Amino acid sequence: MLELTPELKLNSDIPLYSQLYEYIKSSILKGELKAGERLPSIRYLAQYLKVSKNTVVTAYDQLLAEGYISSSDRSGIFVEKLQKEILDKTYAQSFPLIKVNKKSAVHDPNFDYRCGQIDVRNFSFSLWKKVLEQCISSDMSDLLTYGEHQGEIGLRAELAHYLFLSRGVKCSPEQIIIGAGTQQSLSMLCLALNDIGSYMAFEEPGYNGARQVFINNGFEVNPVPLEEDGININELKKSLSKIVYITPSHQFPCGMVMPVAKRLELLHWAASVNGYIIEDDYDGEFRYQGKPIPALQGLDTSGSVIYLGTFSKSLTPSIRISYMVLPERLLKIFKHRCGIYEQPVSRLEQKALQLFIDRGYWHRHIKKTRNIYKKKHDLLLDSITDIMGDAVEVIGKDAGLHILLRVKNDMNELQLIESAYRSGVSVSPTSQYWHNSNTISAPLIFLSFGGIELDNIRESIVRLKKCWLQ
Ligand SMILES: Cc1ncc(COP(=O)(O)O)c(C=O)c1O
């Protein structure tokens, strides 16, 4: 068994588990810890480092979730196999300098699990009002004129800083383009991508809102099936596509996390075909086991990743602000073709958002809502286990704002949704996420737990059991 001797700093702002996680991760990436090597047991390492068992468990959990290690109940915890030549290249790459300037027909809204809901009760109205008011003043009269094409530089600088620290994304503010929601960002992106090829590989199932944008922009979509750990790379290689759209940190809608070995393989593929990976990190802030999973973009060394994010989950969808990070080689093409387009998002709101982030309000909001969503997530899963037991299967837990349910009865998707609705519970279908819906084996129901009140979760599951299983 290995001895690990990280230098853990007790007085640091970085939690101990995070220091331990970083130490092991970088040892694996540098090749100091080799594939197949067995890591010390949790108890042993906790005693040896004089830290709590929780510290080691949390660090190991995060490494497991990201695919750096694997565990088996009987034989222990082992370093996973990663492609050596890609690892060397990945680790050798230095970080670029970051310049930081410093209701429809819902008859019982109490039981609303429809897609896209967030917790509106805990939105910080007073803080948002404060920053907006500050922008609507004669001191800021400059904001009444046209702004920069790529979006406010102050907001982009805040984002570059946040993305590096929280999501592991390496970029300068100049690489960021602010957009009015993911679909608008993707529509612009299509203009820059259309000579890379006319095929777009796409997760099957995947986010239909993005798929339709590609179709509308003339791409032929190649649906690529998912495996347990994300898109099937062998199938991707067989397709004619040089571009792939993926959701690696929390696959939409199935919820799996793409492990690092697969991320590296995908990057290798993109570099070998001189193509692009479009990484949609739509809800990466919300992970309830360990830390959020760092973005794939941070591992890229050949300028193959286009990174997209949105404020729709982490603040509110009504703000309609998204962002896109382009690799340098694509940025040139983008500027050439799209440089003339005016920025679609209000300057006042961009500036307000910049202040909201700069003052730490957004960070506070994410921390607060992450706790709230975790409580809802945990209670929902406990209620499902207690009340429905083995009669349903839960798919895609531990992250984001939704889970999927496979209900073990004879009802089809429409029957499941209609019977739930008659019982006062609004749930959503998932068949629209398949390009070829005839390949769906059994219906899956979408439960978005962001909006429902904590106190209503148990009752809603009791109602679902009555209408689905009795
Ligand atoms: C995969 C995915 N990407 C992005 C979004 C958000 O898009 P927007 O920024 O347009 O609100 C969603 C919303 O549900 C989504 O499921």
Image (cartoon, grey):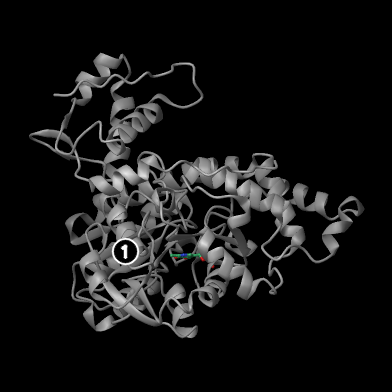
In the foreground, 276 or 470: 276
Q: Secondary structure at mark 1?
A: helix
Mark 1 within 8 Å of ligand 1, using the beta carbon: no
Rendered position, 61 above or below 462:
above
- Provide residue 294's location: percent of width, then percent of height: 41, 46
In the foreground, 175 or 449: 175
- Provide residue 418's location: percent of width, then percent of height: 36, 77
Q: Quadrant of residue 445?
A: bottom left
In the foreground, 29 or 454: 29
The answer, for residue 263, to whether it is visible in the render is: yes
Residue bearing the label numbered 1: 272
- Residue at the location (36% across, 45% down)? 90
Residue that sits furthest to the right in the current view = 138
- Provide residue 211's location: percent of width, then percent of height: 42, 76
Residue that sits furthest to the left in the current view = 74
- Provide residue 69's location: percent of width, then percent of height: 23, 39
Q: Quadrant of residue 420?
A: bottom left
Rendered position, 191 above or below 325:
below
Rendered position, 125 above or below 340:
above
In the foreground, 437 or 215: 215
What amino acid type should be assigned to the residue bearing mark 1? Ser
Q: Is residue 182 left or right of residue 8?
A: right
- Residue at the location (17% across, 57% down)? 390
Q: Is residue 341 left or right of residue 291?
A: right
